[in-house]
Amino acid sequence: MSKFQPYGKSDKNVFSLHEMLPVPVPLAVHIDPSNKCNFKCVFCPTGDNNLLNKVKRPSGVMDINLFKKIINQFIELTDREKTKIKRLQLYKDGEPLINKNFVNMAEIALNSGIAESVETTTNASLLNRKKVKELISLGLDVIRISIEGISDEAYKSITQTFNDYDKILNNVKNLFYEKNKSGARTHIHIKTNDVSLSSDEKNKFLSEFTPISDSINIDALTGWSNSHLKDFTLGQNPNVAMDGVTEITPKNVCPEVFTKLSINHDGTVSICCVDWAHDTVIGNLNKSSVLNIWDGKELRDFRLMHLRGEKNEVEACKSCHYMTGFPTYSNIDNYTDKLISIYTKT
């Protein structure tokens, strides 16, 4: 099998989401160790200070005690339902390794047993040898590396703050070497964004990173939520989803609302991972609990709003580009009456 593939993409429509709902625990959870980043990538809202100021998004890193509290609450939820989260993803809006407690957080998450897979995504700029050894020794299930350029010049153009391609390449080499040396189970996925890459740039990316990865992909740019505020596709308007394969199709109902939770660095809880502006906050784990939020009225009302065709009432949802890229098996547009009946009763 070729390693050129979007990690986690299903090859076949092995299930239909409507048949699974309601799910007793989130299928996936994002917890954001840091919504700060040392890059200011031109396609990423976190890189646009003016935009963040406009939407008044708070900035910071997650406190370790808050993280422990959140994990304990997920232990309570998963124990109650006797099932695990499929994927716990320790990242959301920023660079997770900026948080000095990240390794400790990952260890706590892994030891909790709440998830079948514990994962993170990093730009690899902070992966010094010490950090590489720490991350590999943890036994994370997946580490995704975002490559932001194929040369010094490309890195500077995209990130606006960084221009050392060889440093990134060497950091990834060290990570892959350490993983193989130790026999760690960690799956290393390498990805880059197709920012109008030339054939030569694509070939260079694949030739240099394929030997030091378990899987690799060239992603399409996506418009995220609040796409009316900025064109995050840099004028490309792609007809495929982020994986570069799935065809974009309009949808009335977002499946994320029914299957995921995203916890921001400050403990507020958003509906989905692309709510970079924190427009879909439905609770705060400094004041409430995972149990109350997952089973709560605010989330139920949000789901019913989508099912009733009223997503345009939410600023983040009305022009969300991301939701158009979900695969066919997650489309629940034709099952709204059935799901309204279910979620009205829960």
Image (spheres, helix red, strand yellow):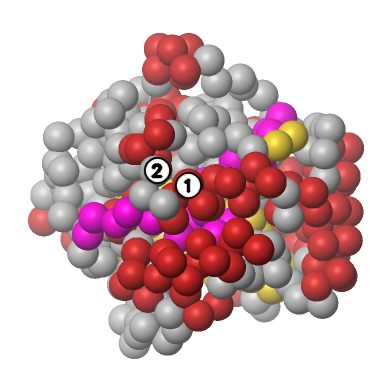
What residue sits 42% from the left and 86% below the top?
Answer: 14
Q: Is residue 193 visible?
A: yes
What residue sits 23% from the left and 49% below the top?
Answer: 194
- x, y percent for residue 220: 26, 52
What residue sits 39% from the left and 43% below the top?
Answer: 310
Residues tagged 1 and 2 counted as in contact (Cβ below 8 A): yes
Disc with the residue nearer the chain's start (1 vs 2): 1
Name the residue type under label 1: Met
Secondary structure at numbered mark 2: helix
Find residue 305 and name its label.
1
- x, y percent for residue 31: 67, 46
Above-or-below relation of 194 to 65: below
Find residue 311 and name its label.
2
Secondary structure at numbered mark 1: helix
* Magenta region: 249-273
> Within 10 angstroms of label 1, few (less than 14), some, or many (20 or more) residues?
some
Q: Quadrant of residue 78?
A: bottom right
